[in-house]
Amino acid sequence: MKFISHGAAREVTGTCHEIQLETPGGTRRILLDCGLFQGKRTEAAAKNATFAFDPSKDIDAVILSHAHMDHVGRIPVLFKRGYAGPVFCTYATKDLAAVMLADGGYIQEKDEEFFRKHLGSTRMATEGPLYTQEDAKACQVLFRGQNMNEWFTVCEGVRAQLVEAGHIVGAVMVQLEVTEKGKVTRVGFSGDLGRAMLPIIRDPAPMPPVDVLICESTYGNRVHEDIATAKHHLRDAIIRTAKRGGKVLIPAFSLERTQEILYDLHLLWDAKEIPAVPIVVDSPLASKVTEVFMKHSECYDQAMFEQFLSRGHPPFQFSLVRFSETPEQSKELNTTPGPMVILAGSGMCEAGRIRHHLKNGLEDARNTILTVGYMAENTLGRKIVDPAITQVKLFDRMFSKKAEVISIAAYSGHADMSDLDHFILKTDGVKTLILVHGEIEQMEPLAGRMAQARPGIVIHKPEREEEVNL
């Protein structure tokens, strides 16, 4: 049996890991996630367009941990290249993936139009968009919804169950039982491990006993602020910016982070802790995702019921909030004076309407750029939050960072170093630990702590396409 990481190996985006085993019927190959790479555009485009295997004949099944694009975003490409097997996931992930992938296809089409128009002489040659909205729709025939905590057959020699990950709605860890030559090996995949006490969703469940643990390491050497402080930082930023007459621009993932911010804004407004400023969700995708959220109450935690649902209050809608749908409505926001709060995608500022709001607002000292999530290396978002960088490039122009820039790390949906330590050490039976989904400076300290805490454990930090014999 082998483990091969095709993505998110010593990096944070592009999750795609393979379990390969031998059975009486031949070699079986399973993918754990199949996500988009993000970062330097030319490099990411090359990675996203190619696979180290033939999707039409090499892969038997895919299991998805959740619907973030860096975990699900290349399923349409897999389908275009001939993959016709099942894609197993929770029912919530299935519904969210349909929305996320359709939006991804739209972005791919629009990016292609822009590159052909403005960068025709310098862009790398492609066959067109990575995938289209039609491809995103067509690949939905592959998805197979599963209940959490129920075993199902993946392919010959492999069965699996999905366990609550506490990261976003529908997100799971995966436990596999792999039978090879009469021996059963238990393999666990953390997906993106969440945090306790996040709003809306349940806390992560323990990972059942496994022999091999594939674990994310995004924050392997960093401690988050207490999630309870996030709401107060959000309040203070809005009050301070409103006094200046400025706008709070929040690049937020349309999936989960936007809903978390709306949830806290609702609590703050109910408590009269923020002024009555317009709050605009400038993201058609966020509107669709919010509709899916309301369909899947099976994923909610008790606080969600107690705060809102038991009283019949919609958690993500209140008097200050409006959703901007059309491009014309979005453009109007740039000429509408503040104070105002605008939430727009994408979360790492690599696409979407937030880029236009940054273009119009980054050089206004009255404004605040408020980041509420992880910014991967080489993304525009990382450059904006880096205090050493005074100018950033947007739409082929350089813009000075004159707006106030604030990062609220407490909103992170990823486990921090103490959460990861606790998770790994509380998982029984682990003989082999494989660290993925982390930059090396976060991964190395986590590996060092685990080697010291569990003498004899075998730890791997594989590079992309490196094979690990299990």
Image (cartoon, rainbow, N blue to C red):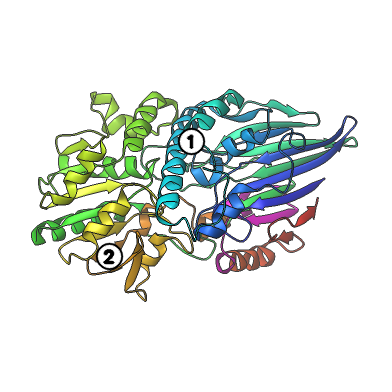
Q: Secondary structure at mark 1?
A: helix
The amino acid marked with disc number 2 is: Val
**Quick check: 298 left or right of 431?**
left
Direction front: furthest residue: 121
Q: Residues within 10 Å of mark 2 (few under 14, many from 20)?
A: some
What residue is disc 1 on? 101
Front residue of this view, candidates 78 and 116:
116
* Residue with the mark numbered 2: 405
Could you tell me if residue 395 is visible in this image?
A: yes
Where are the magenta residues, as a range?
A: 423-442
Mark 2–mark 1 distance (CA, rounded to whole Å): 30 Å
Q: Is residue 226 visible?
A: no
Check disc 1 and give the amino acid type.
Leu
Residue 242 left/right relative to 451: left
The residue that appears at 12% across and 45% down in the rendered structure is 272
Q: Position of residue 243 (x, y in %)?
A: 9, 59
- Left or right: 201 as drawn, with respect to 232: right
What is the number of the mark on residue 28?
none
Q: Which structural element holds mark 2?
A: strand
